[in-house]
Structure formats: C-alpha cells, structure tokens
Amino acid sequence: MKGVRHYPGFLAITLVCLAVLYVPLLVVAVYSFNASTSITKWGGFSLRWYVDVFTGPEAERFGLATWNSLTIALIAASIATAVAMSAALAMIRGGRFRGRGASYALINLPLMVPEMVVAVATLIFFTTIGLTTGYLTIVLAHITFCIPFAYLPIAARLSGIEDSYEQAARDLYATRWQAFRLVLLPLLGPGLMSGWLLAFIISLDDFIITNFVKGAGMETLPTAIFGSVKQGIKPNIMAISSLMLLVSILFVSLSYIINRRGRRAAP
C-alpha cells in the first residue's frame, strides 16, 4: 500500500503550504536585521533594531507589556495545568461515570470553537457578572482556553502509565495521597511539564481573546505590537516579532522533546 507522500502532487502541495506558512516569518526575521529604516529595502546587516527594543523611545511601553504577558502566562499556565491534571485523573483514572462524554467535550471545547466566538462570549460573560475588564479578566480567560492545551499531553502521558504502580503502593500501606505524590506524580512529570510549556506559550502569544477582555490602559505584548502596527510597521516591530517567534519555537520544541522522552521512558 502506498504512503500518502507517494500520491501525485502531494510534494508540490506540501511545499506550497510550507511556503505560505513560513516564508513570511523568514522575511520578518531577516528584515529585523536590516540597518535601513525601510521595511522593504535592504540596507545592510545591523542589530540596531534589537537595541532599539530595549533602549528606544518605546522600550518602556513594550517592557511593561512584556511583564504583563509573562506574569499572566505564568499564572494561567500553572492554574490551567493543575486543572488539566485533575481533569485527566478523573477522565482516565476515574472509570465510567455519568457525563463522562460531556465532560470530555467541555474540556476540549475551546479547541473546536473559533477563537473570535470564545472572545465575544467571554467578554459578554464578564460584562454580565459585572467584572471590570483588566488584568484579572485576562488571567481568567487565559486559564480557560489554556486548559485543553495542557490537558492533551498530560492525558497522553497518564494513559501510558499502568495503574498497577499505584495499586502496588496501596498494597504496601501507602495512602492515596502518598501513592499519588510518591509514585504517580513523578511518572506524570514529563506530561505536566510539556502541558505547562504548551499552555504558557499559548497564553503568551494570544491576541484575539486578550484584545477583547483587556480593558482600557491594559496591554500585553501582542496587543502592544498591534497598537504600534496600526500607526505603521516599524523595523523595531520586526525585531520584537522575531524575538517572540524564537521564544515560541523554543517552548514548543521543549514541550515536544520532554513529551517524547517521557513516552520513551514510560515504564
């Protein structure tokens, strides 16, 4: 039986898709080293725009936005990972229970619903309950849509761990908490780390939901970049975008490596 890559036209379609997805990113990365103030004409290699990011007139604004993004992502990823771990334990170790299918669908709902719809619904919900938009609403929104991203690697890792290890610990007079803390949690570690890294970078890069629920005067790095771009694309924006791209690649790669090594080391 032929593999999919042997079908006529598969290679060409793949190359076109890769070009559409990644060539613009490469262009932004290359022109972030442009010495010229033009975003279309090459003026030689320079790091001036990376220096401008940290010392230029907009450095304070972008610095505050970066701090907001990092702290929000840290809080959201940590809480989302804890919730996702609890959900994975209930779904995989909890056996059959009424509403199991509905619970699984609810956990994965943010992955299936368009992000714009989630953003509008979240804003309406916060307005209905009288919650003022700002830092807190961004954190709450990020926790919600980060849960399924953290859940997937955690659930995959937990599915590969036999429950016999916990049963053996219980047979040796360990309590449920001791069996979880001393046996299951260390085995689940790679999945937890992978899920946390994925949730962190999803939160850090989010724009649509954040833009809806951030409120006036509150900026994260993606919304600050968008606000600056509305006044015209500047070379320093390309430098910031390249740095964000580098961080995203690093975190996603770490998540993949940790999850893969965890699967290989699974008992």
Image (tube, rainbow, N blue to C red):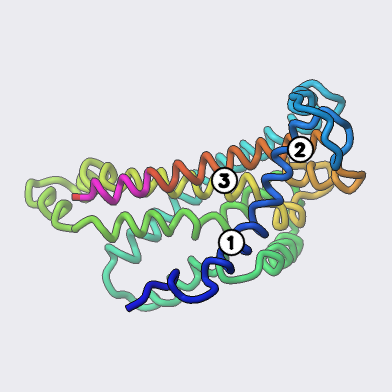
* Kind of residue indicated by mark 1: Leu
Asked which secondary structure carries label 1, the reply is helix
* Kind of residue indicated by mark 3: Ile
Q: Which residues are magenta?
A: 258-266
* The image quarter in which residue 2 lies: bottom left
Which residue carries the number 1 mark? Answer: 15
Looking at the image, residue 81 lies above or below residue 160: above
Image mark for residue 201 = 3
Q: Measure the alpha-carbon separation of dots 1 and 3.
A: 27 Å
From the viewer's side, name the closer residue of 254 and 194.
254
Taking the magenta stretch, the answer to whether it contains residue 261 is yes
Which residue carries the number 2 mark? Answer: 31
In the figure, is residue 2 to the left or right of 129?
A: left
Total marks shown come to 3
x then y, percent, for residue 84: 43, 56
Taking the magenta stretch, the answer to whether it contains residue 61 is no
